[in-house]
Image: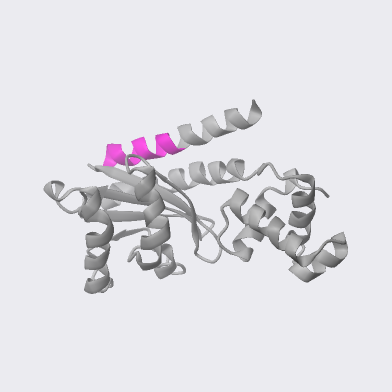
Amino acid sequence: MAEASKAHRERDTIALVFDSVQALAAIDDCGLYWVDQEGNAFGHAARNLSAEAVSRYRREIAADDPLHPRHFCGRGEQAVDLRDGRIPSARRERYVRSFLAPCGLLHELDLFLYDDHRLIACIGLMRAAAAGPFNNEEAARLQAIAPLIAALLGKVKFEATVNFALTGRESDVAKLVREGRSNNEIAGILGIGRSTVKTHMEHLFSKTGAVSRTQLVWLLGSSSSALPN
């Protein structure tokens, strides 16, 4: 029951965020994802895009996304338009052709959200050609509410990672991962084979949605109350 309630709060908060940005700028769709300390994106969600489109973005498009946070980490960017002159035209055109156009979209403005100067999330606002590109007034309005949105999403991120429904042995492995232990060290400490450790690690990556070991440690650290001491 608690997990279901938490999931409802997460969905309600994300819906509130989408409603808020839609009230400030005319959009046809919007998506969001969280960003770890290395600039990796995870936890993707979208308002209208199909699950297949979101999955395809993660598998095929994200690595070449001209608005991906790795291009802007450390710059303090708040809002970046796809028309930004710093984006190579070939990459922009490829992104439009391979992702936006098949979804019936053309224009995109990404809002970068921070917690104590660290980038924690990104919201992509998208619209079709008929609506025209985003203007400076829309960008200014969105940036003005960015701190509130960041606070909301930071809370969702924490709640969403409190409990990953780990098995007892996965929790044992997770605790050692948080301590910075290698797979070989974990195998020795727990008295299990390296292949078994690898299997548990695969389960941890799958359950947390992490894309790197560093991100896994960070996510597990956020959920430390759910792990053994």
Residue located at (39% from left, 44% from top):
51
- As drawn, is 110 to the left or to the right of 10? left
Identify the residue at the far top of this view: 1
Report whether residue 144 is seen.
no
Q: Quadrant of residue 176?
A: bottom right
**22 relative to 198, above or below:** above
Q: Position of residue 134 (x, y in %)?
A: 21, 52
**22 relative to 227, above or below:** above
Main SS class of the magenta portion in the image: helix
Q: Which color scheme is applied?
A: one colour
Q: Position of residue 5 (x, y in %)?
A: 58, 28
How many circles with numbers are drawn on the protein? 0
Is 20 one of the magenta-colored residues?
A: yes
Residue located at (71% from left, 56% from top):
200
Residue located at (45% from left, 67% from top):
73
Closer to the camera, 128 or 133?
A: 128
- Quarter holding the N terminus is top right
Is 166 one of the magenta-colored residues?
A: no
Residue located at (65% from left, 53% from top):
203
- Range of residues picked out in magenta: 14-24
Q: Position of residue 7 (x, y in %)?
A: 55, 33
Q: Quadrant of residue 91?
A: bottom left
Q: Position of residue 28 (x, y in %)?
A: 24, 42
Closer to the camera, 5 or 121?
A: 5
Report whether residue 216 is seen.
yes
- As drawn, is 34 to the left or to the right of 64? right
**1 relative to 62, above or below:** above
